Amino acid sequence: MDEQVSIRGGNTTNGKGIEGESGGRVTVPDSISPLRQLFPILNQTVRGVPLAYFDNAATTQKPVGVIEAVKRYYERDNSNVHRAAHDLAGRATLGFESARTKVAQFINARSDREIVFTRGTTESLNLIAYSYGALAVGAGDDILLTELEHHSNIVPWQLLAQRTGAKVVAAPLSDKGDIIIDQFRERLTARTKIVSFTHVSNALGTMNPVAELVSLVRRYAPQAIIVIDGAQWVAHGPTDVQALDVDFYCFSAHKLFGPTGVGVLWGKYELLERMPPFLGGGDMIDRVSFRETTFAKPPSRFEAGTPHIAGVIGLGAALDFLGLAPWPEVAAHEKAIGEQVLEGLRGVDGVRLIGAPAQRISVASFRVDGVAPIDVAVMVNNNGVALRAGHHCCMPLMERLGVSGTVRASWCLYTSQSDVESLIAAVRSTTQRRSIKRLAKVEERAVIPGAERSAPSVAAAAAALIGEFDGCPDAAMKQELLFEWGQSHRNLLERLKECTTPVPGCMSEVRVLLRRTPDGELTMASDANAGIVRGLLTVIERLVSGQQIAELREFNIRAFLVRIGIDQFLSMQRRNGLEGVLQMIEAEVGAFEGVGR
């Protein structure tokens, strides 16, 4: 077995992660298996098989202690915090402020006054950009990021640059997904005022060499402050903000086995004390009059309004759970799971791993040849496997890697060997979709033909579709029907790219061309780069193409889609994309209020 790396101890600044790629098989320790039993959500079946949850980079599950702490607050202690004299408020305040102390201890802050509660990593980064950025950044200054960053660590800095005339600069990556150190150093100049980068990439699992990067900033841009997005790291390794020698550190409770809607901003107190408030309101003031308002000291200055009290108390319970975990064994467990995931994926024909960083933490991104990432995620869900697909809020990174998106598997301390076996078997089953039967590409013509009318009327088309979907005994069969229709959908994507723009809102590329004929009919030509989406487009085409516009004005398309059960196959992005298609149809038939609104 490779050397075990303790999560709750050791040098936190050496840039080494707990996930290696030694090529050897590592046995998962049995000593942490009881931890899994503390997560009740994992003891369920999905589509009739045991759940294998590999979406931990998006959010981790919650142990019993966290669930009970939140429940106990609402059952016994529900009250607003601070300023009240009654017992409930006292207990609520004690639980809330105790969590602040636990966070300070967890990351080795100098004082709990350096701990600001926010709604999440995103809000924490926005707070720094808005509040500190107003003090430190001006026209001609640089804000240095990297190509690894999540949108939450890009957009706030872009907004700051727009307000101030500064410039956002990105340090490039190698093809393997590591920051190119020499080029990072070259971008550190006298103009650099803020350097912000992720501790661990949410898309590739790249573990950045934080100590080396910090040392370069301190040497070549000593005037710059350093901000770390720690969302993907804190559940996997020790976090010592003093040893890291950074200025701000941000993370979210929900990626640390705690509740959603709670985040942490740690900042050096001398910086927090200089910063103006981010939001105004109650609990962040010293004195208020119509002449002027003076503000409270940090952290209260940045916690306007009633906070997410139950969530903060739940975060405290999550830290209690982490404090009891056998961390050396957890580190060895995550390392072994990671090696098994990577070894298994490499053994599946048609699977291509995306990125090969020098140090990887609990994330593997991949693609399956011939199958869109979203289709992979939808298909493996039939085997009880939960994955994430898309650009993972890292569109610049995807562009750098030359892909539109990936399938992402992410694991943590409760992931089991059985989960890995389910994952690999489910991914292997998706490779059967690689030889997709598509109709021949249409001949070059001046006009792209719309779909033929599927029935003599809209009502008849709807009845036929209802019959086919009602003939499917369960959701899996309906999904299979959509995939079959997607496979036989006309191959028009390249042609449609020449004359249309993508439908906004959908993670997949969706193209739609609508025309009104002289006979008062609507024709529709469409295509997408994902099978499940092509299937959805087939449903819409069969319903509307070739039909009389007057009939379409009277037909409630949205209610019909709910009737046949399409809504259960719609992620938020697919729902937004479908909404975009329906709005295009509405605009074409001239019935903005009449098509199911």
Image (spheres, grey):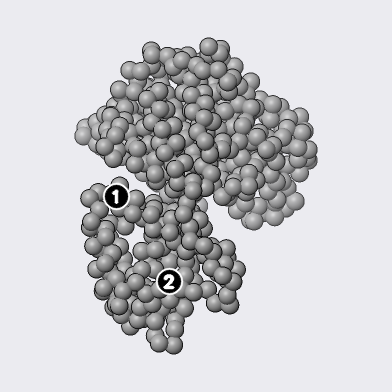
Q: Residue 124, relative to residue 542: is it above or below?
A: above
Spot occupied by residue 373 in the image (x, y as percentages of width and height):
49, 46
Q: Can residue 178 be seen?
A: yes
Q: Would residue 178 appear left or right of 311 to someone viewing this image?
A: right
Q: Would residue 166 appear left or right of 322 to someone viewing this image?
A: right
Relative depth, front residue between 232 and 37: 37
Q: Residue 591, relative to residue 51: is it above or below?
A: below
- The circle drawn on residue 451 is 2
Spot occupied by residue 446 in the image (x, y as percentages of width and height):
58, 77
Residue in the image at 56% along x and 50% along y: 404
Q: Quadrant of residue 307?
A: top left
Relative depth, front residue between 592 and 368: 368
Secondary structure under the numbered disc 2 in the rendered image? loop
Residue in the image at 34% along x and 50% along y: 480
Q: Amino acid at mark 1?
A: Met
Spot occupied by residue 90 in the image (x, y as percentages of width and height):
29, 31
Report which residue position mark 1 lands on: 477
Q: Quadrant of residue 359?
A: top right
Residue in the image at 52% along x and 36% along y: 349
Relative depth, front residue between 325 and 293: 325
Relative depth, front residue between 184 and 575: 575
Q: Residues within 10 Å of mark 1 (few under 14, many from 20)?
A: few
Q: Quadrant of residue 573?
A: bottom left
Secondary structure under the numbered disc 1 in the rendered image? helix
- Distance between the alpha carbons at the discs numbered 2 and 1: 25 Å
Spot occupied by residue 154 in the image (x, y as percentages of width and height):
60, 47
Q: Can residue 268 be seen?
A: no
Q: Would residue 336 appear left or right of 244 to someone viewing this image?
A: left
Q: Amino acid at mark 2?
A: Ala
